[in-house]
Image (cartoon, rainbow, N blue to C red):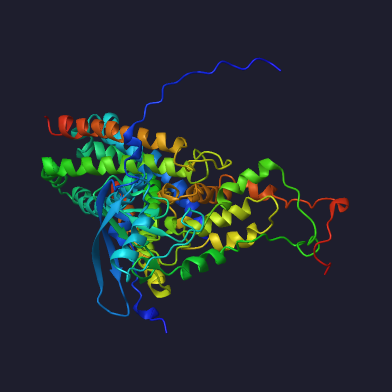
Amino acid sequence: MEEKALERRNMAGVYGGWLKFWNRNFERWLYTMHRITGVGVGIYFVIHIWETSNAATAFIDLRVGGSPIVWSSLMDLLRNVFAHTGLLLVALAAVFHSLNGVRLLLSEQGFLVGKAKMPTYPLLPVSLKGAQRSLGVALVVASFLLTAYAFYQLFIVGLGW
Amino acid sequence: MGEKPPVEKVALKFDPKILQGLGAPLKTVTFKVFRYDPAKGDGVRYSSYEVPIFKGTTVLDALIYVKEKLDPSLTIRYSCRMAVCGSCGMVINGREMLACKTQVEQLKSETVVVRPLNNMPVSRDLVTDFDVFFKKHRAVLPHLIRDDLDVNINREFQQKPEEVYDYLMFANCIKCGLCYSACPTNATDELFLGPQAMSQAYRYIADSRDDGHRQRMEVLDTKHALWNCHFAGSCSDVCPKGVDPAFAIQQLKGMLFLKSSFLKRKRPAPNVPEAQKRELVPER
Amino acid sequence: MKESQVMIIQYLTGVGIILLGALHFALLTFAGGGYDNALTFVSVMGVYTSLGLVFELFLVFLTFHVFNGFRKVLIELHQGPTYERTVTWIVVLAGAATFVWGTRTVLIFLGVL
């Protein structure tokens, strides 16, 4: 009698589940950023390996009597604001993903998440008040500070600003 | 008999503000409610209702008002109206809440959008199908497992109060499904066990009387189980009973790696001695 | 392989990446004489001849961690036995290809290729 086949699937999906972090807890934002930075740095890694290996043929050229101008001309091509901004974003993503990864390594093994206790009103969860939340705030701040150093290297040293 | 203490004379002044919202409504709030009827095949629409809100009016009260006075076709699920049965879970203004526990005033909004729980098939309007949810709960064997249950049918097992607190928090689960709806992994992974099932697995593994951790870990240490939780913590954030499923799941992961001594050292609690045996069930 | 065994390697390679990644970053910045100097032909050649094997180890850690990460995200997106098997194979092959291409770089700089 029940029309089970017509029931609406109703999954929150990638937008409603992975990306929509607002109106929720701080750790949900960290989860979304960890996923985005992970995929982002992962894609950069593949491109970087491909690009560097192709550029390395300059060395083969050198050994058969070519010149290192191929390498330096590639470096000159990449010495611009857009490429360095991209690298800065990669640096921010990598630093955030690493530091949050350390936080996850500890909290996903049951550390820094508080202790089970007798439930009393207002029935708040212990894990969201544990040390892992303070660590989360600290690591976001640390990510920006470390990226500031990368900015110095990429733009002030690298581009001569 | 001692002296009577002096009576303090306090001047009581009547403040009319305490009567606000009792006799007359505080305000009128617009409810935009998700409507879906599979038998009609119309698809999803949102119906708007103007509901008078008194002091203490809950979202459930408002929906019952809509059903009684405005639109009897609205389909909702509720029972105890006091946050113990777990029937009235919904997504209210973007967050999973129990309708009976949420006062409309605390939402601080002139418009309230009510949707059914995520990640479960919608049977009709705000009612979702919990079949898969309960199936995943049963998959973690949510009952005491030990070899000598039959022999000890008339006996209690020894358990200190501190050992009760190790799992008591998790035993408060009312299977309302709010955590399942809030979880980002459940949002895309249909085979994922979900925070409720895994927190109940922990409730039994952490119970000193239980000896079934090997069987439960076989279910938990697979694809689409323990390791697809990434500690987003929204399950614990929305749980109305403070069960904290995120805590339980991280402890379970710890038991497989950095805290593995817990399972290695675990022995099921012994029974209470012969002298305290009670004749309740005939010996098998 | 049990999922927990895969995850232990994911955690350990993650830690390894932090350490070796910090080294890579250091060699590109303060330990390399500043960003513009560190990427000259001479500097890069010098780093690879002395630390080529360290870079190779970094590549091993990264390949596992990145492609296992991609695998987890793809399998959470859609489920089904054929889909999951296909995704695992694609991820393994793509990881192997990336590893080979990266090893090629190290071998070129070390003068072997």
From the viewer's perspective, is A60 left or right of C22?
left
Residue at figure coordinates x 12%, y 44% from the top left: A82
Residue at figure coordinates x 36%, y 35% from the top left: A137
> Residue B5 sits in which quadrant?
top right
Q: Position of residue B22 (x, y in %)?
A: 35, 45
Above-or-below relation of A151 to B126: above
Quarter that holds the N terminus of chain B: top right
Identify which residue, C88 or B129, lies in the foreground. Answer: B129
Residue C105, can we see it? no
Identify which residue, B82 or C88, lies in the foreground. Answer: B82
Figure label count: 0
From the viewer's perspective, is A103 left or right of B169?
left
Identify which residue, B86 or C15, lies in the foreground. Answer: B86
From the viewer's perspective, is C60 left or right of A83?
right
Q: Position of residue B184 (x, y in %)?
A: 37, 56
Residue at the extreme right of the image, as rendered: B275
Quarter that holds the C terminus of chain B: bottom right
Residue at figure coordinates x 20%, y 33% from the top left: A151
Residue at the extreme bottom of the image, as rendered: A1
Above-or-below relation of B273 to B215: above
Q: Position of residue B100 (x, y in %)?
A: 42, 54
Residue C75, can we see it? yes
